[in-house]
Image (tube, coloured by chain):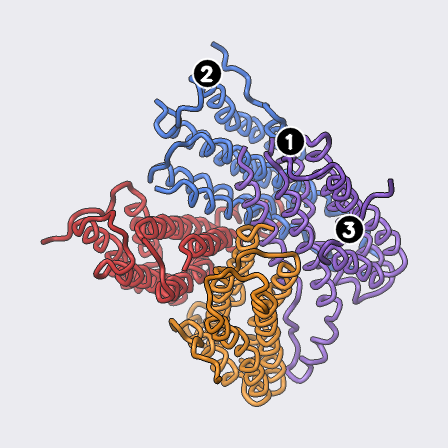
Chain colours: A blue, B red, C orange, D purple
């Protein structure tokens, strides 16, 4: 099994998914004089775009960080990776759903936010599962990480899922707050060294 | 001829095709209170998405497995590869057709399922032809496989086509069962070592 | 300047453009009982898809063949390459135009076919210009080709443009014949060794 | 951190974004006899397509030129890179907005042109910031550039932003002139050695 082709395929899917996010932002069809107003009304599209872009970008960075440490890949890891990509590819759809119904308020807004946060949760769970599979007993790891470094990464790569669940619960009450939490989580992951704290002993 | 650029181009097409599957899942345009119901009604879209995602993902894995063993590529192999990709690129369309008409039942459902299964069949036939061209008399293979290993892979890479034909026949009676068969075939291929059994002597 | 990144970017554009062709094939919105008929009515979409797929695939193969022989790339070659890609990216649009109006006959059909053939012509001219720039006085070539081999490739890579002009003239009379000519040209290029005949001395 | 995967991901995003520009050009739905006229009416789509294609292509070339000189990448550079890509991915939307409203004139045209130029400005600022981060005190650079060469590149890679601001101001008066300025800037960057002049001492 060839690690670099697995990376190339995954990079391709990440790149296409992050770029397809743009299709969610509509060109308003209004009389010219109302364009500025119509563009302003679309703020949920911009907010959703930025948050989803950050999420995919950060997951790509984490994916990259995991694969740096893999000495080899096997067929089961490829299946884990496909399972992760299954949720990544859904993100443009979930983003579009969020952007459409966050404008409308009420029950539709809550349902859309729950679906959005659930997609992120499943993505986070898949990522944690991929890392856990690869790192347990150093199954696919090289020798470049100490046991302590592995534990820190295990914390980093599995903490996302429960935090997305928090966002999912919040989604039942407020779509914008749910979006802010998911965006904050992405910013946290983007910070150098973030999430690298030691697990409580 | 440069194998790695052929892989890069193919990986690109696989990655774009698998990601375009998301365009098939619609954002319902309903009053907010009916969103949950409308999302539930769309189950054929989710089912088709998952199955097609698995099919493309698994074919990518098999493509990868074949190219690992090629010592070189020639212009005819590139033509075989383009012929395979011709069907891969059609999958998002066939998936969208399936998702649209599986909701409706009746003759439309059967026609859509036949087109879907026929696309998979032609893809499977192309894959088998690519392998057969590359492996016959070890035309493009290196020395890393024994004759027995080649025979096993020939079984693995040519058994897909007749099984897709079974799904095609089933499509005449039931679109969901056809979908289940094609999904099961993908799961079977995804299992490590699956399809690697010896050909009957 | 780094040849491999230029190849990677170009491969990405080729892969996305060839895959976007699928968006041109519509999912008919008809009552279930009329689906088979509606799918049959769409034959110009399938024909255009196959021809455009073959064209992009074959141009990719030729692009690959050219870059195999480049010892280095410069900024002007990158500009030539972008100019080629400008037309490649237009092909999905030209294909969709062809597919839409070939169904309708009359003046619309002729206009669509002219635009389609003109896109191919401009692409062919750009390809010839790229090769001519790279090969004149062996500007960017390595030492692996003899003068005679360079001349044969010059024939191969510049003959496309005038043949596309023939297709453009034919487009004024018949869109299907124009499509057949362009498809035949792609098949000719796909054959191993095609177009490699010696230039008349 | 692995430079080549960062390049591969970025190349993927550039390639997808530049190819998605084609979705902005519509297939007119008119009676066949009016197709030529309808295609002519769409000139703002073609003009916007060409300019945006040139901008993305040239930014890709500059991105390439920057990364050639990086000895290593760090997590903060990856964040800078994602911030740049955030605006690159928006370009197909901004282009579509421009093409739609440049046809209509009046206030809509000015608003669309301002949004288009603002997207380019933010992209230019991000590019300058990426280069500044990487090159300050040779933070991520190798030893292949002299101090003078670094200064010239700093000029080259930061001059874009203020020129895009000029285009933005012009957008308040004329969308076509704004488009011409942005296109001219791309041509200037595409010229070999362009922008490589010494900074005033």
From what the image shows, is residue C36 above or below residue D63? below
Q: Of residues D194 and D46, which is closer to you in this image? A: D194
Between the residue at mark 1 and the residue at mark 2, the CA separation in whole angstroms equals: 24 Å
Q: Which x, y percent locates residue A120?
A: 53, 36
x 42%, y 64%: residue: B86
Circle 2 — which element? Answer: helix
Q: Is residue C168 visible?
A: yes
For the residue pair D73 and A161, the one nearer the viewer reads as D73
Mark 1–mark 3 Cα distance, whole angstroms, equals 27 Å
Residue highlighted by disc 3 = D195
Res B192 → quadrant: top left
Q: Tell me the crowding category of disc 3: few under 14, some 14 to 19, or many 20 or more residues within 10 angstroms, Cα based.
A: some
Q: Is residue A182 left or right of residue B108?
A: right
Marks 3 & 2, CB-CB < 8 Å contact: no
Task: Residue at 43% x, 75% y: name it.
Answer: C196
Q: Which residue is mark 2?
A: A148
Residue denoted by label 1: D76
CA–CA distance between discs 3 and 2? 49 Å
Outermost residue on the bottom side: it is: C173
Residue D103 in the image: above or below residue A192:
below
The subunit letter for the residue under badge 2 reads A
Of the two numbered discs 1 and 3 in the rendering, the one whose residue sits closer to the viewer? 3
Q: Secondary structure at mark 3?
A: loop
């Amino acid at each position: 099994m060839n690690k670099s082709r697995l990376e190339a395929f995954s990079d391709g899917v990440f790149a296409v998914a992050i770029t397809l996010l743009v299709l969610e932002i509509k060109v308003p069809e209004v009389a010219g004089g109302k364009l500025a107003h119509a563009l302003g009304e679309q703020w949920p599209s911009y907010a959703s775009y930025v948050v989803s872009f950050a999420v995919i970008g950060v997951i790509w960075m984490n994916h990259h960080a995991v694969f740096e440490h893999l000495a080899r890949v096997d067929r089961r890891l490829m299946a884990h990776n496909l399972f992760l990509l299954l949720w990544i590819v859904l993100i443009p759809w979930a983003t579009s759903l969020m952007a459409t119904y966050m404008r409308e308020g009420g029950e539709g807004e809550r349902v859309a936010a729950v679906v959005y946060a659930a997609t992120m949760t499943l993505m986070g769970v898949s990522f944690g599962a991929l890392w856990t599979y690869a790192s347990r007993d150093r199954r696919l790891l090289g020798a470049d990480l100490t046991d302590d470094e592995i534990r820190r990464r295990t914390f980093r790569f599995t903490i996302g899922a429960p935090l997305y669940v928090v966002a999912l619960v919040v989604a039942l009450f407020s779509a914008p707050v749910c979006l802010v939490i998911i965006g904050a989580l992405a910013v946290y992951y983007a910070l150098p060294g973030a999430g690298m704290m030691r697990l409580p002993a």
